[in-house]
Image (cartoon, rainbow, N blue to C red):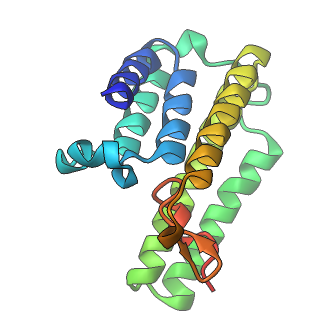
């Protein structure tokens, strides 16, 4: 219930200041209620927490525009580089390896990470927002550390610690 309450509070706060949407998204990916024993009732509801966090953040970017830091230039060189990297990945997916099931999954993850990076870089450019992000990383790291420390022995598979971390953690170091 605590996660559910914090999640929805952060969704509503992101409508006032979108940095809370970024924090919410980061917490969802660090805590991932779908794999925790306490998150099974939430899993059965079928809610995609990361999607809701992202949607509320996007709405917050529009509704709470005054809390989005102004940047000059409006699109920096590295951000154009991120867009170029996205276009190269899209062309490679369509012309190179083809748009099969694995390519589609990886491409979906890729554009989500790039979009999050662009939003994150804009919102975390203020010192106060950056501190909020750092404390979110500290809190999430402590949670992940505790989760890993208390993991049962069956969670160690082929030198990996499974069932710890967010939904995309399980595919981060596959061979």
- Whether residue 138 is visible here, answered yes or no, is yes
- Whether residue 48 is visible here, answered yes or no, is no
Task: Check the image and report above or below for 95 versus 28.
Answer: below
Q: Residue furthest bottom?
A: 97
Q: In the image, residue 137 lies at what x, y percent?
A: 68, 36
Residue 132 in the figure: left or right of residue 63: right
Quadrant location, the N terminus: top left
Residue at (45% x, 22% y) in the render? 60
Residue at (61% x, 66% y) in the render? 87
Q: Residue furthest left?
A: 45
Quadrant location, the C terminus: bottom right
Residue at (39% x, 24% y) in the render? 11
Task: Check the image and report above or below for 108 versus 29.
Answer: below
Camera-side residue of 2 and 7: 2
Task: Check the image and report above or below for 113 versus 20.
Answer: below
Camera-side residue of 158 and 61: 158
Quarter where residue 59 is shown: top left
Q: In the image, residue 109 lies at what x, y percent?
A: 50, 62
Residue at (64% x, 32% y) in the render? 139
Residue 27 in the figure: left or right of residue 140: left
Residue 16 in the figure: left or right of residue 114: left
How many marks on residues?
Answer: 0
Q: In the image, residue 116 lies at what x, y percent?
A: 58, 44
Camera-side residue of 20 and 146: 146
Q: In the image, residue 147 lies at what x, y percent?
A: 55, 49
């Amino acid at each position: 219930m605590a996660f559910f309450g914090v999640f929805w509070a952060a969704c509503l706060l992101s409508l006032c200041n979108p940095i809370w949407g970024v924090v919410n998204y980061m917490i969802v990916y660090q805590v991932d209620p779908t794999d925790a024993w306490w998150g099974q009732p939430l899993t059965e509801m079928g809610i995609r927490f990361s999607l809701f966090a992202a949607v509320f953040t996007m709405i917050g970017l529009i509704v709470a525009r005054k809390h989005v830091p102004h940047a000059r230039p409006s699109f920096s060189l590295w951000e154009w580089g991120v867009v170029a990297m996205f276009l190269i990945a899209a062309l490679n997916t369509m012309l190179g390896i083809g748009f099969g099931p694995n390519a589609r999954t990886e491409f979906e993850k890729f554009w989500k990470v790039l979009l999050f990076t662009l939003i994150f870089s804009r919102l975390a450019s203020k010192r106060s927002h950056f501190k909020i992000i750092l404390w979110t990383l500290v809190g999430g790291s402590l949670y992940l550390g505790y989760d890993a420390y208390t993991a049962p022995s069956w969670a160690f598979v082929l030198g990996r610690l499974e069932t710890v971390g967010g939904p995309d953690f399980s595919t981060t170091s596959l061979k």
